[in-house]
Image (cartoon, grey):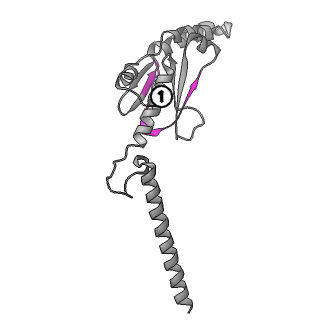
Amino acid sequence: MTSSPSQDEAIFAITRPHADLMKYYLIASFVIPPIFPILMVVGAIRFRTMRYAFTSEGVSMSWGLLFRKQIIIQYSRIQDIHLRSNMVQRWLGLSDVLVQTASGSATAEMTLEGLKEFEAVRDFLYHRMRGVKDDHPTVDAGVDAPVASSTPDELTLVLREVAAELRAVRSELAQRKENSDA
């Protein structure tokens, strides 16, 4: 799941939801006909004011006319990412990307709505999330090197050395116990 620089640039270029999100809001507002005008105005304002920003540090989302809301999440805080789409969204080719953090809430911290490139965004976020967590400096010396950068043969050798050390410690402790009992 590696991302190329051109894919990253395409994600960084996303600043607004796709225009089909407005069609979705229109269709969704017909669900309750008596309040159709209110739902349509709310959906139009949300669509017109919604902005996304993908940076090297994290992702942010903002929306609102009278009461502006902005959410900024650093990649290192992301715990999980989900895709959600209902039948109408799938028909329009849209999906929501739900970003969860360890905030203790059962709901998503951020929902990126109206994206056609939702799988690419999900993969990008997973790559960034893991890249932040796996960004450890590597050491050239044997046991101090991270396990992830070791080959299976090196890992086997290190595990055998650890097992031998444990056996030596165990036998030393047993001898000390025998000497103290005698």
Estimate the x, y position of residue 2 in percent, counting from the top left: 42, 31
Examine the rendered structure and indicate whether residue 174 appears above or below residue 93: below
Q: Does the magenta stretch include residue 173?
A: no
Estimate the x, y position of residue 72 in percent, counting from the top left: 43, 31
Q: Residue at x 47, y 56 (%)?
A: 156
Residue under circle 1? 123
Number of callouts: 1
Q: Is the magenta stretch mostly helix, strand or loop?
A: strand
Q: Quadrant of residue 3?
A: top left
Estimate the x, y position of residue 173 in percent, counting from the top left: 51, 79
Q: Would residue 71 be seen by someone viewing this image from the given angle?
A: no
What residue range appears in magenta?
A: 60-84
Q: Would residue 86 be seen by someone viewing this image from the given angle?
A: yes
Q: Nearer the viewer, residue 153 or 76?
A: 153
Q: Would you say 159 lies left or right of 36 here?
A: left
Q: Would you say 100 lies left or right of 154 here?
A: right
Q: Would you say 94 lies left or right of 136 here?
A: right
**Circle 1 sits in a helix, a strand or a loop, which is it?**
helix
Instruction: Give the farthest residue toward the left.
Output: 140
Q: Which of 178 and 39 is in front in this view?
A: 178
What is the quadrant of the C terminus in the image?
Answer: bottom right
What amino acid is found at the position of numbered circle 1 in the picture? Asp
Q: Does the magenta stretch include residue 83?
A: yes
Estimate the x, y position of residue 77 in percent, counting from the top left: 46, 39
